[in-house]
Amino acid sequence: MASLLEGQARPIRLADIAKAAGVSHGTASNVFSRPEIVRAEVRERVKAVAEQMGYAGPDPKGRLLRAGKVNAIGVATTEPLSYFFDDPFARVMMGGISEACDATGAGIALVSAANQEKLAWNIQSALVDGFILFCIEGGSRLVDLTRERRLPFVALELGFQDETVSAIGVDNVAGARLAARHLAELGHRRFAVLSLAFADNRTGFATPDIVRGALYTGTRDRLAGYFEELARFGIDTTKIPVYETENEEKSTRAGLEAIFAKDEPPTAILAMSDRMALIAIDWLKARGLDIPGDVSIVGFDGVPDGALCTPALTTIAQPITEIGRRAARMILDHDGTVRRETMGVELIVRASTGPARTG
Amino acid sequence: MASLLEGQARPIRLADIAKAAGVSHGTASNVFSRPEIVRAEVRERVKAVAEQMGYAGPDPKGRLLRAGKVNAIGVATTEPLSYFFDDPFARVMMGGISEACDATGAGIALVSAANQEKLAWNIQSALVDGFILFCIEGGSRLVDLTRERRLPFVALELGFQDETVSAIGVDNVAGARLAARHLAELGHRRFAVLSLAFADNRTGFATPDIVRGALYTGTRDRLAGYFEELARFGIDTTKIPVYETENEEKSTRAGLEAIFAKDEPPTAILAMSDRMALIAIDWLKARGLDIPGDVSIVGFDGVPDGALCTPALTTIAQPITEIGRRAARMILDHDGTVRRETMGVELIVRASTGPARTG
DNA sequence: ACTGAAATTTGAATCGATCCAACAAAAATG
DNA sequence: CATTTTTGTTGGATCGATTCAAATTTCAGT
């Protein structure tokens, strides 16, 4: 039986129930949070009064202040919220985070703002026990903002070095070497690199100066890995074009145009993300080039889409789900220490790579 | 300059700052929430003290209690949390919700529990201003639980009738008729229906009794739509096999086996979800049947995957994103009224349907 | 110096619960 | 029947902020 005054101005508080039932607020509270210690008769009376008055149950807002624990972990990024549901990499990662949260019954609060001021506010006011940060771009600002909350947090895909911050990343150098070796062993000698950003807001061919001054060490490490390995095969890496993109459609296509406009077009492309690799496959097919007949391509990340496209993408797979799981667990059982983990990667050979054309 | 005691037992409160800076709590509070009304000199002094003591800024937990507004909307389901990132329909819907939330700066809190007791607790303790409910299954329990919170909520995909609950749905009858007409006009006369559940925990051929006793009106309406339209073409709908699945791989495949084991296998399949339709395409192809040569198939929902598979799926598209947007807006600018909206649907003809084989 | 208006600051009240030491009542023990 | 133990109940303190009416200070104008 609901209250007759559904639209009452002030919602009913626990204290109202206590008064109406003629018990102290302490007892009323116990009826809901530790019913077993209240005498059955009293318990039923209070419950009946609550029911009759249309009490919504203890308000979590009140409980929260006392308890301190929100029982939810925040996942933040500088992208719009839809990023979490659109981006294949993010989705797999969220799958891992979800798993860990489901296991402990924790919730997930999605926090975002493309908008700078709102980002600050959203991070400052998010009701969470800790943060997982997707540091796609503008990562350092996100980290700084989060640090101020003095809550536990882990940075994912942190593109830069900062030993004071907990982070989970992958072995970029090793992954890049795996990719490069695979192509070199297939006989390829003319390469091009589709690179992630070395610093914010730049696209175009990267000069050695730019690479040396890299803000993002992840990008730098992948390039270093490619070059180290190719050099072992006697390839002159100074001649390899490295095109910096924003990891999206437009700049990646521009990069491909620029790369294939050169005199000696590559027979193999090293892409620093599956996203770029998939765009490249699309672009190459549209241009009538055969993959891997004319051009081989290796991605980086290991998103599920790579397995489904035609031809299926050879790539360096990160243990994305596992990274998500660990990140969530780091927050959930936070012990105050800074942890930095580096995960291994794996070469997955599929149909987008093949032997270099002889002659 | 951070505090020397990073690991201090008790975090610093606004009151500590106030005392240290020699101002009242009121003023200290204003320094952070309405800095413009405090004298510059005082403001700087308080800020300096805060900085020096390593104050993390006003704790949202405290603010919340006073302010009342969480500025986040909860999205709940009985599926595990990963559902939001895996399921194509959910993802598109979340895209719409994200858009609306981004526009107003609200956050999204994901709430779930496959587990029954946890579901209750999670719904009861979620810090949100309102809920959007994904009523896939066990929807009525979810609605009951949420109603107790006395917060605004909207039910999506609500499979059953309950006029006291705000809900957004689609015109199931109209959509189903569109699908049926399309196939009938292509000359098909032998049909089978891959149906969603009429009640919980049932699979197998549905008898008229089961249909009549349907708990889920959405399923019932779609079937009614199919049958009404087919009847207009003079088709005996009592002969059409209707197989109830759980909208997943196993039961759908079982349904297809059962349907194609019959004497006169259908030339057209009406699937009540794209999920089932896509599974059917896979199954039919594996069996060596040509689509749409041997069998035509129409889905329902309009998820993006339908456009990408081979052959691309003809389907009844719901305005999924728009539903998500509206649901979010209903919560965000809730005015205390119960709203029920029915959205239109659209037939999207792609490659999975073609003329019935003559003779 | 005096006055009234405007700008700041204060401190008590409030938000809605939980916790816990102290107390009371009932039950068990000697 | 007195004493201890067990079980239940009470009400004040607390969680960490915001709000607002009232008090105080500042300042322009005379």
Image (cartoon, coloured by chain):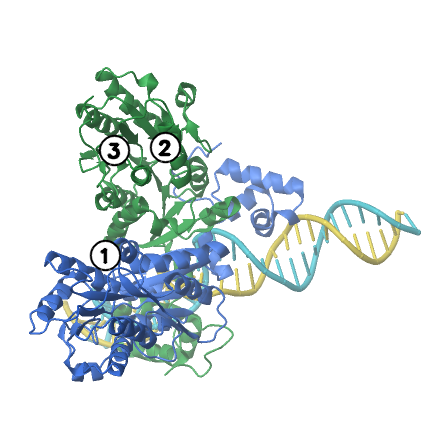
Chain colours: A green, B blue, C yellow, D cyan
Decide: is A253 above or below B190: above
Q: CA distance from mark 1 to mark 2?
A: 30 Å
Residue picked out by circle 2: A256
At a point 26% along the width and 64% down the height, the residue shown is B78
* Residue A75: percent from left, percent from top: 36, 48
> Do callouts 1 and 3 mark residues in contact (Cβ within 8 Å)?
no
Q: Quadrant of residue B154?
A: bottom left
| Residue highlighted by disc 1 | B311
Q: Front-most of B210 and C3?
A: B210
Mark 3: amino acid? Val
Q: Amino acid at mark 1?
A: Pro
Badge 2 crowding class, 10 Å Cα cut-off, few under 14, some 14 to 19, many 20 or more, is: some
Give the farthest residue toward the front.
Answer: B359
Question: Residue B63: in sight, yes or no?
Answer: no
Q: Where is residue B290? Give x, y as percent.
A: 15, 60
Residue B322 at x, y percent in the picture: 42, 63
SS for callout 1: loop
